[in-house]
């Protein structure tokens, strides 16, 4: 499995730092991943939904540690690149607007 595209939508919130969408093998889209700043630094939260009892349940997630680490490494790398790139209308992005996504495609 290859992550062939990563779109990062930075936000300016205390813990939530970005929304992310990824494409796997140029044929499967996974949206609504989140870059979160937790007590031990940045991590990637998988897409989830709130159950009736208020708990959250992952909708999609890696089945093993190797895959999770591969996804997290690539997503955080692209998040770092997105933060370092100046954008048009950076004032809007600094205010928390995520209208201009950062896109990275893997070289194959």
Image (spheres, rainbow, N blue to C red):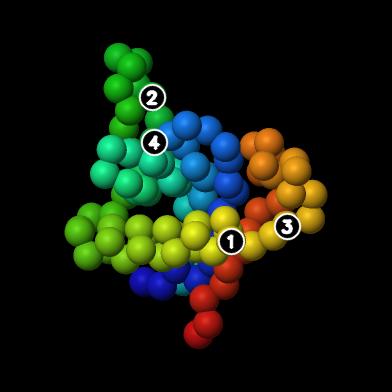
Contact between labelled residues 3 and 4, with CB atoms less than 8 Å apart = no
Name the element at disc 2: strand
Residue 94 horizontal/vertical position (percent): 67, 42
The disc at residue 87 is 3
Which residue appears at 35% of the width and 58% of the height? 72
56 above or below 91?
Answer: above
Label 3 sits on a secondary structure element that is: loop
On residue 84, the disc is 1
Q: From the viewer's perspective, is 20 left or right of 37?
A: right
Q: What is the quadrant of residue 12 in the picture? A: top right
- To which residue does mark 4 refer? 48
* Earlier residue among tags 2 and 1: 2
41 versus 16 height, above or below? below
Q: Where is residue 47 drawn, in percent x and y?
A: 41, 41
> Whole-Å distance between the Cαs marked 3 and 2?
34 Å
* Mark 2–mark 1 distance (CA, rounded to whole Å): 33 Å
Q: Quadrant of residue 7?
A: bottom right
Distance from label 3 to label 1 (Cα)?
9 Å
- In the image, what residue occupies the spot 58% across and 46% down? 10
User: Is residue 38 something that shows in the picture?
Assistant: yes
Q: Is mark 4 in CB contact (under 8 Å) with mark 1?
A: no
Percent position of residue 98, x then y = 66, 43
Q: Looking at the picture, does residue 32 appear above or below residue 2?
A: above
Q: Are marks 3 and 1 in contact (CB under 8 Å)?
A: no
């Amino acid at each position: 499995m290859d992550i062939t595209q990563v779109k990062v939508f930075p936000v300016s919130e205390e813990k939530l730092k970005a929304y992310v969408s990824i494409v796997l093998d140029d044929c499967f889209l996974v949206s609504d991943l989140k870059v979160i700043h937790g007590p031990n630094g940045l991590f990637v939260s998988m897409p989830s939904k709130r159950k009736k009892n208020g708990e959250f349940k992952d909708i999609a997630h890696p089945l093993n540690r190797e895959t999770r680490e591969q996804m997290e490494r690539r997503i955080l790398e692209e998040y770092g690149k997105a933060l370092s790139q100046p954008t048009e209308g950076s004032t809007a992005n600094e205010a928390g607007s995520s209208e201009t996504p950062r896109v990275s495609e893997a070289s194959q």
